[in-house]
Image: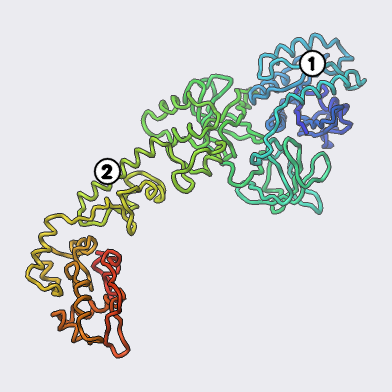
Amino acid sequence: MHVLATAGHVDHGKSTLVRALTGMEPDRWAEERRRGMTIDLGFAWTTLASGQTVAFVDVPGHERFVPNMLAGVGPVPAAMIVVAADEGWMPQSAEHLAALDALGVRHGLLVVTRSDLADPETATDLALTEIAATSLGAVETVAVSGATGQGLDLLRAALDRLVTQLPDPNRTSPVRLWIDRVFTIKGAGTVVTGTLGAGRLRTGDELDLGGDLVRVRGLQSMGRPADEITAVARVAVNLRGAAKDRIARGDALLTPGRFRRTDLIDVRVHGDAVADLPATLTLHAGSAAIPVRLRPLGTDTCRLRLARPLPLRIGDRALLRDPGRHHVAGGVTVLDVLPPGLSRRGAAAARAKTLSNMSGTPDLADELRRRHLIRAADLAAMGVPELGSQPVTADWYAHPPYWADKAGELVEHVAGYRREHPLEPGIPLDALRHLLGLPDRALVEALVHPPLTIRQGRVSTGDDALPDALRHLINDAFAGLSPFAAPEAYALADRGLGPRQLAAAVRTGQLIQLTPGVVLRAGAVEQAAELLKALPQPFTLSEARRALDTTRRVAVPLLELLDHRGVTERLPDDRRAVRPGPAVSPETRRSDDVAPRRRIGLEKS
């Protein structure tokens, strides 16, 4: 199917022409028929000689109903411009053409109606001159009479030629169906209609409607039910889970997660100079008409604050209209749907410079260069096409120079923390995230590469050496003591070895912690295992204590640690025996150097 909008002044025969082409009545409402003009949008369709189907969105021509007209033109790729031979070019002809130009419509056809009442040449010449100065450029012309049928065959042939020029729709893209009518049908419920410009709809599909999920209960196109409809098509969608009074023209059915609703956009204006525009205008996007406040930025760029969020993407075309002056101010191309704040001094001028170089074509490299860091879902919702490069972690994408700079900053922060806090096991990941200004802890983890390491939520340089001063304190504290002698905590504290210093020594393997108050020199556990092997097996706690020449305060947790390591086995009568086989190396058991029932306090201080 191909969808065309009609455009032209009121009472120039648009609906009569559509009726003559299709045999259908586009003016659906009794008030429209009574007054003899289209008030709301009408729809009709016909099959051409080539077999192609053309659907017409018959839009109202009266100035009071221009917003309705824009709702019909917005999603449509081509237009049939209608001018009456006996009246010629008129004010609403000019406004409709300005709207088509502002929206960037590039395909069209001029139809001069009522050619049985006047010579169409004058009206044709003036209309072609006006149209040629717009995005439509040169268009084919057909003179007809809806009353007599004159020229209708020529018009059908011209329509066949026109539809062959229309671009192929993207049938794999996400759905954004702008709603232009909503009503209820007894026994079916809520029904909405719109022009499906891209993608496909299936019964059973789940769609996003204003942030709520609704399900497609049924589909119709050209009056016939369907299980699947592909673009381009006029479509009626029967919705489950949607109340009629909560839906209005300008809402949109969306593929979930693929569009970003935004009430703040930066745009390029094609039309009036930005400096001449009033502060308040109406933005027409799709079938929506939203009041906006305008903030000029550059000569042709500005920021728009929307009265309510719309699902917009980079590159979308929309229209600005001044309803007070009945004036189309121009079209807009959406440049950014997630613009930065402008609160800092000079930010607006810098933003204007950035916008001047933006094309309105979504591009991954451009977005990363401006934003530095962004999630894949946000890129997709902005309209950025296939993401060719790989994310830096999870669904995060980063601008390569920015990412390299952050990696360098991380190394500097880790080294600086090591210098300032030599007893700490490294800088906490969350502290690093704050220093680097990153929004996700996973990004910090992705920046850590050897020789840096992550252990227990901290990033360290991999250099676990103790400061020389602390090493000397430890040597002095244990000088002259047997391998299994543990100084009292107060004696260690008097020498400057408090909980933080001892924790650092345990972490770096200089000391072994048996309980929060009992620490031994490195290697004591391995030496104890060798001495206990020489005892008659099994042995008691007292026999072990005498063999090690130590106190019960040390012997009990030391034996528990040997049990935990699998070096010794505790028997039912509380005696122990050394297990056969090699002892577990201290490197593989450093994290288990505290007896399991006593691992509290010191290593966490």
Closer to the observer: label 2 or label 1? 2
**Residue nearer the viewer, 230 or 248:** 230
Q: Are marks 2 and 1 in contact (CB under 8 Å)?
A: no
Image location (x, y in percent) of residue 592: 29, 69
What residue lies at 27% left-to-right and 66% top-to-bottom?
A: 590
Give the distance between the C-alpha atoms of the residues marked 2 and 1, in whole angstroms: 71 Å
Q: Is residue 459 left or right of residue 137?
A: left
**455 vs 80: above or below:** below
Q: Is residue 464 left or right of residue 118?
A: left
Q: Is residue 360 left or right of residue 428?
A: right
Amino acid type of disc 1?
Thr
Q: Residues within 10 Å of mark 1 (few under 14, many from 20)?
A: some
Where on the picture, by quarter, is residue 137? top right
Q: Which residue is mark 1?
A: 141
Q: Which residue is mark 2?
A: 412
Amino acid type of disc 2?
Glu
Q: Residue furthest right?
A: 148
Image location (x, y in percent) of residue 53: 82, 32
Callout 2 secondary element: helix
Q: Is residue 596 visible?
A: no
Where on the picture, by quarter, is residue 487? bottom left
For the C terminus, the quadrant is bottom left
Callout 1 secondary element: strand
Image location (x, y in percent) of residue 61: 75, 25
**525 vs 300: above or below:** below
For the N terminus, the quadrant is top right
